[in-house]
Image: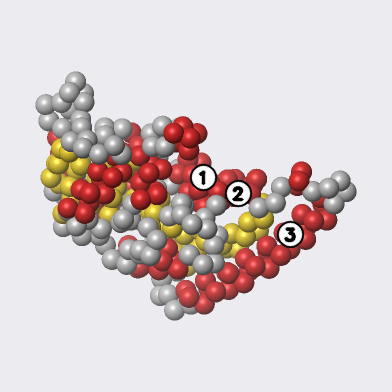
Amino acid sequence: MNYKTIMTIISDDSRYRPALDTTRCLSERFDAHLDALCLGIDPSRQGFYYAGASAMMVQDNLVQVRTDVEKLEGEVRQILASNVLPWSTTALATQSVTLNHIVSHRSRFADLIVLPRPYGEGRGHNAEAIIESALFDGGVPVLVLPDGHSLTHAPTNVVIAWNESSESLRAIRAAMPFLKAATSVSIAIIDPPQHGPERSDPGGSLSQMLARHGVRAEVSVLAKTMPRVADILNRHASDKDADLIVMGAYGHSRFRESILGGATRHMLEVAEVPVLMAH
């Protein structure tokens, strides 16, 4: 497949530019339609207001949010005005309680979504909710950018995190346009099980599948020398001078990862290069 609709979701007027620039460059690279969804989010909850004031205060908040998001959309449209390829923008005002529905409904027909890192200083629950809604409810692969990073060219060196899961395989299939364009692809397998289905040839079946798509990949079996999988992947990506990591997202439940942690959450917190994820 190829990417024909690449989307970015903008909900923060201070951090959207790298994701928008990446979306522009990838749209040109893959001859794709660019779709920018600008969201104004009212974080208040109706039940927190004093009796009799809810409807009026909610309406006032939504009017202000709508004004702010229309201004944000205007800035985005000015940036995209010089684009040769087709593009579109949408401005929506919503509340936090309806955010998941808005994102899943708007994102499900995209081939790829580009988003900034959801964790870090100044970022709240909404950034996390957007990426999870796209992955779980929209069913769309998401390219997550670390702070200060953009992907303005096809990645040269790609690391695939392979653990034989269906999530990993979906991410690999979703990343195929990037993998075909890369000059180096490394399949990273961390501490494979001794009695797993690929015990005699870790990564062999995946390598064969990629080869049939014209992707030559090498397999790197890594020992679990650090407590967190994300740290091992980051170190391997640094050793390979990778500019993209491909991995499955949320092999465990979101609740478990939010409470106990997990490879997905840790990677989103500490990734040093862009990460393409799928669930």
Position of 182 compared to 111: left or right? left
Return the residue at label 1: 133
User: Does residue 96 sit above or below 248 in this rendering?
Assistant: below
Judging depth in this view, the residue of 235 and 264 nearest the camera is 235
Name above or below for residue 279 compared with residue 89: above
The image position of residue 43, as x and y in percent, is 66, 53
Q: Secondary structure at mark 2?
A: helix
Q: Left or right of 28: which side holds 158?
A: left
Image coords of residue 88 (percent x, y): 51, 66
Q: Residue at x 82, y 52 (%)?
A: 55
Q: What residue appears at the point 35 percent right and 46 percent down from the top-left corner?
A: 267
Viewer-side residue, 174 vs 236: 236
What amino acid type is highlighted by mark number 3? Asn
Tag 3, which secondary structure?
Answer: helix
| Amino acid on which disc 2 is placed | Leu
| Alpha-carbon span between mark 3 and mark 2 | 16 Å
Badge 2 vs badge 1, beta-carbon distance below 8 Å: yes
Give the residue at mark 3: 61
Q: Position of residue 90 (x, y in %)?
A: 57, 63
Q: CA distance from mark 2 to mark 1?
A: 8 Å
State if disc 2 and disc 3 touch (CB < 8 Å).
no
Give the foreground label among 3 and 2.
3
Q: Nearer the viewer, residue 157 or 83?
A: 157
Q: Mark 2 sits on what residue?
A: 99
Figure disc tally: 3
Mark 3 or 1 closer to N-term?
Answer: 3
Q: Amino acid at mark 1?
A: Ser
Q: Which corner quadrant holds the C terminus?
A: top left
